[in-house]
Image: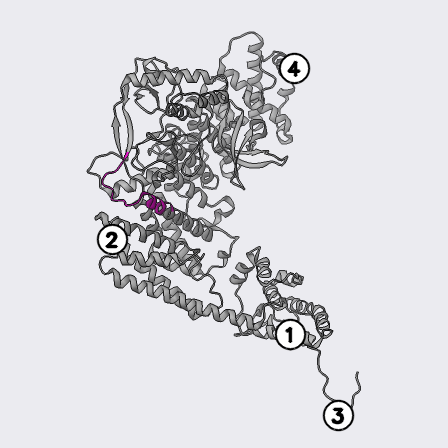
């Protein structure tokens, strides 16, 4: 209690206390009234209640200002009068800034989440303001992000209310100017265009407008925060109007203008429109994107600018081909010693440099040479496009269809597609190709055919067809004005389409972004747009055909563009589908919203593409196989069986009467892998085996795979066939084959293991080209530092293990008695022993091992087999032996 005289003045509160109270009030009030209603106290009918945690945290945050503010005011009071006049009172500054904040509306939960999600937000604010003092932190700021935003503004001495007010006025003027530019440009396009928008004045105006943009903004309203809702609406309306006028102009004049003089204007305005559309779209823009049908627009632009070429045949003299073949074979014998030293000798010699480069290009896979694209510097594992006029110029598919012209290469040069390889010398076939009509996927170069260098299975009595050399030449009727400009348009349109597809898929499937709190109406539009994007991609895959170019003049040019784009873009389209396909953790969203990949139609499409029925390229087959594995891992087994039945495979029909659902699909996959293994298709067999190992981790497939494995084990007792080896590889684990696309763990310049993907393996050098999953950098690593990532699931039961033991005892006894056995039988025996070795290392499998393992016969046979030498080098790795 304090005693005072009645005439004494009223006691005044300290300025520090009033400032802290105003800071706390700022956290609960804004220009529209009370905010944060969810943390206000709940008052009962008897006017009693408890103070909520939010109010206590707000009080603690506001109280944390008191001591620092008192210290600042003491420092200010200790200064001289002249310095006091130049520096504002800290308490007055706090109070004015707190009251100034109450004039604005509070942020919504979505805005708060997006604001706090940026990791460098605080650093950016402090850097702009020049404030080096850390903002006071408390537990309340972690639970209530709005408290943190208030404290950062109030505690920063640089941001005053006057300065913020001035900045908002400047932004309002800037927004007004931007909206006027958009509206004037839209009106100018309407007035000047009339019926022909591709005129010189229109092109000059928009080129000049683009030249004044030193750097393109991330969004058409970027940097306009705080300008006011009315100004933002004007900017949005002006931008939408300009885009509508542009899109209407192109849709009214679809395709490249027939008059060649209009083609340059058409291309330039395409570039301008793509730059205007290259923004980070916000949820409120989705309705406009849907109205303009931007996915279809981007895809049409990419198809219009695809590089069109005709196929023509060229007859090469047989003497010249054989002379070149003999030269290459002589060089090939010289390379057998040391390739690096041979390369240095050839570079210093006076040999024909073009022939020397062509030798390396044709036998790049055998010589273990890394070939890179001269357009984008991407490593080319195999097939590619090569110029016939340039000394050494290779292009990937994306650069070829985009019309990229690196260095001295010109668009008028002739191109050859290196796609077919000779089954004997393993070199790419450039000139005449000898195709066998009886063997499966068999081709020879003319030199190997004439000299009768045939691999096993092919003879000179087989029916063959001689296919002359095919070259790709430019289309003469193409009205293109600039190949470089059209290449830029093609790549830009595809990137915008892919970016929009990825953004929409992230909005539909992801739970880790601000899109989780998207308005239901916006979310519905996002789902529809994603459906449109993926429908465009799948439609392109369906347009792929074995014969695309050179089909005759009766095929319209637009149709040829569409089919050419589909053929050359199939790999990146398949990659885009893999990027947007939801993972297992997001599977529950696929049936509720967005594109549903788990359908019979889509799975059937992947089955056909992976099997090679649609004329797709080899890389597309592998990508489809991997996507099919991901899809099957979280798909219904009954739906998969229905899709497999439509393929009409004999294995699926044989398993129709199976009691376990999924048995037809499993039988088809095992048969597919076994046939690939018999044809020495190691990459295919490895991919199928890894996919089956992945399916073992899915509970809905375990019973079907276990039943099929039991049937395979039962068949070992009667007869061991080459088809029996592949199921054993799935059970025991496929060897560590470093094939293209395999996931590996590697060490490079550090002891820590890193994750990567194999781009190419060089067996002779014992090196592997790996791309890191995080950094996307390529490294050449020794094979000893690379290990394949493979998890072999336990699918064996006690009965199956007993059958393995009896099979091993029988085979080892026959070996001990000196009986001659087939290679397949010995191979299966080694895999059986590998399975039993894994059983001994696992506690769960060890419990299922029967008494036969510890029997006298098994131990004696095993000791007898171990005592025999292998005759192999001790320096070999286990994966090399396998």
User: Which mark is first along the chain, 3 or 1?
Assistant: 3
Start-end of magenta stretch: 473-491
The disc, 3 or 2, on the residue closer to the chain's N-terminal end is 3
Q: Residue 39, how many percent across, how many down?
A: 60, 68
Q: Does the image show residue 856?
A: yes
Q: Quadrant of the C terminus?
A: top right
Q: Which mark is residue 856?
A: 4
Report the Cα–Cα distance between label 3 and label 2: 89 Å
The number of discs equals 4
Q: Quadrant of the rendered structure where residue 317 is?
A: top left
- Tell me what residue is drawn at x 59 percent, y 16 percent: 873
Q: Earlier in the sequence, mark 4 or mark 2?
A: 2
For mark 2, what is the residue?
253
**In the current view of this chain or complex, which residue is farthest to the top?**
818
Pointer 1: what residue? 86
The answer to whether mark 1 and mark 2 are in CB contact below 8 A is no
Give the image quarter of residue 392. Answer: top left
| Disc 3: which residue | 7
Assess whether residue 488 is covered by the magenta stretch: yes
How many angstroms separate mark 4 from mark 2 (CA)? 87 Å
The residue lying at 40 percent from left, 43 percent from top is 599
Labels 3 and 4 touching (C-beta < 8 A):
no
User: Is the residue marked by circle 3 packed among few (<14), some (14-19), or many (20+) residues within 10 Å?
Assistant: few
Mark 1 or 2, nearer chain start: 1
Q: Nearer the viewer, residue 187 or 141?
A: 187
Location of residue 565 with respect to 879 vertically, above or below: below
- Percent x, y of residue 310: 26, 35
The quadrant where residue 162 appears: bottom right
Between the residue at mark 1 and the residue at mark 2, the CA separation in whole angstroms equals 66 Å
Give how far apart the Cα atoms at labels 4 and 1 are.
Answer: 100 Å
Residue 175, given in percent of the width and then of the height, sits at: 43, 67
């Amino acid at each position: 209690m304090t005693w005072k005289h009645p005439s004494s003045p009223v006691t005044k509160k300290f300025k520090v206390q009033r400032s802290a109270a105003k800071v706390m009030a700022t956290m609960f009030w804004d220009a529209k009234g009370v905010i944060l209603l969810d943390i206000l106290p709940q008052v009962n009918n008897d006017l009693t209640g408890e103070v909520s945690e939010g109010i206590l945290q707000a009080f603690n945050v506001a109280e944390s200002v008191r001591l620092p503010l008192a210290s600042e005011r003491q420092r200010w009071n200790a200064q001289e009068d002249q310095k006091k006049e130049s520096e504002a009172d800290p308490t007055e500054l706090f109070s004015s800034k707190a009251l100034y904040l109450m004039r604005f509306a509070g942020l919504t939960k979505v805005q708060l989440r997006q604001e706090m999600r940026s990791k460098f937000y605080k650093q950016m604010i402090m850097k702009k303001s020049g404030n080096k003092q850390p903002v006071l932190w408390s537990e309340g700021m972690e639970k209530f992000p709005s408290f943190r935003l208030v404290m950062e503004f109030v505690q920063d001495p640089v941001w005053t209310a006057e300065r913020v007010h001035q900045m908002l006025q400047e932004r309002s003027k800037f927004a007004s100017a931007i909206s006027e530019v958009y509206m004037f440009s839209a009106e100018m396009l309407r007035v000047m265009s009339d019926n022909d928008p591709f005129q010189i004045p229109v092109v000059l105006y928009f080129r000049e407008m683009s030249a004044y943009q030193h750097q393109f903004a991330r969004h058409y309203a970027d940097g306009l925060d705080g300008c006011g809702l009315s100004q933002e609406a004007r900017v949005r309306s002006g931008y939408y109007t300009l885009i509508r006028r542009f899109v209407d102009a192109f849709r009214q004049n679809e395709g490249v203008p027939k008059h060649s003089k209009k083609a340059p204007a058409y291309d330039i305005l395409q570039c301008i429109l793509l730059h205007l559309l290259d923004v980070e779209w916000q949820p409120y823009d989705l309705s406009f994107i849907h109205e303009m049908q931007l996915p279809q627009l981007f895809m049409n632009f990419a198809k219009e600018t695809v590089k069109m070429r005709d196929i023509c045949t060229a007859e090469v003299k047989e003497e010249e081909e054989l002379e070149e073949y003999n030269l290459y074979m002589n060089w090939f014998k010289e390379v057998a010693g040391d390739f690096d030293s041979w390369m240095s000798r050839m570079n210093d010699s006076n040999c024909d440099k073009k022939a020397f480069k062509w030798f390396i290009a044709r036998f790049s896979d055998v010589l273990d040479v890394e070939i890179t694209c001269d357009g984008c510097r991407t490593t080319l594992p195999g097939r590619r496009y090569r110029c016939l006029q340039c000394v050494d110029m290779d292009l990937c598919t994306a650069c070829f269809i985009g019309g990229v012209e690196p260095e001295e290469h010109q668009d008028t040069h002739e191109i050859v597609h290196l796609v077919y390889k000779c089954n004997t010398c393993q070199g790419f076939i450039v000139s005449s190709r000898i195709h066998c009509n009886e063997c499966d996927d068999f081709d020879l170069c003319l030199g190997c055919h004439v000299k009768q260098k045939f691999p096993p299975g092919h003879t000179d009595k087989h029916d063959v067809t001689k296919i002359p050399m095919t070259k790709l030449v430019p289309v003469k009727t193409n009205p293109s004005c600039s190949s470089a400009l059209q290449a830029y348009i093609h790549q830009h349109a595809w990137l915008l389409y892919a970016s929009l597809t990825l953004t929409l898929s992230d909005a539909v499937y992801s739970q880790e972004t601000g899109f989780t709190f998207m308005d239901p109406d916006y979310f519905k539009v996002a789902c529809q747009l994603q459906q449109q994007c993926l429908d465009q991609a799948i439609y392109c895959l369906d347009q792929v055909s074995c014969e695309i170019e050179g089909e005759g003049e009766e095929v319209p040019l637009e149709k040829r563009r569409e089919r050419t784009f589909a053929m050359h873009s199939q790999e990146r389209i398949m990659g885009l589908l893999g990027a947007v396909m939801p993972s297992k953790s997001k599977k529950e969203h696929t049936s509720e919203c967005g594109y549903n990949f788990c359908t019979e139609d889509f799975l059937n499409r992947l089955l056909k593409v992976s099997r090679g029925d649609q004329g797709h390229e080899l890389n597309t087959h592998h990508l489809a196989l991997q996507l099919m594995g991901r899809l099957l891992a979280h798909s219904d087994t009954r739906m998969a069986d229905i899709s497999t039945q439509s393929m009409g495979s004999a294995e699926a029909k044989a398993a129709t009467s199976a009691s376990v659902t999924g048995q037809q699909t499993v039988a088809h996959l095992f048969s597919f892998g076994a046939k690939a293994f018999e044809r020495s298709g190691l990459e295919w067999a490895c991919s199928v085996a890894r996919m089956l190992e992945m399916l073992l981790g899915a509970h809905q497939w375990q019973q079907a795979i276990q039943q099929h494995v039991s049937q395979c084990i039962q068949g070992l007792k009667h007869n061991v066939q080459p088809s029996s080896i592949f199921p054993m590889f799935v059970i025991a684990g496929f060897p560590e084959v470093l094939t293209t696309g395999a996931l590996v763990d590697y060490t490079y310049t550090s002891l820590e293991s890193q994750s990567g993907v194999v781009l190419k393996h060089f067996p002779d050098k014992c090196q592997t080209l790996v791309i890191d999953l995080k950094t996307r950098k390529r490294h050449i690593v020794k094979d000893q530092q690379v290990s394949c990532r493979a998890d072999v699931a336990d699918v064996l039961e006690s009965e199956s293990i007993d059958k393995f033991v009896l099979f091993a005892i029988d085979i080892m006894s026959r070996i001990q008695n000196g009986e001659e056995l087939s290679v397949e039988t010995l191979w299966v025996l080694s895999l059986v022993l590998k399975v039993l070795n894994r059983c001994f290392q696992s506690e769960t499998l060890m419990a299922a091992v029967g008494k036969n393992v510890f029997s006298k016969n098994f131990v004696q046979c095993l000791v007898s087999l171990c005592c025999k030498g292998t005759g192999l080098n001790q320096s070999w790795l286990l994966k090399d032996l396998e």
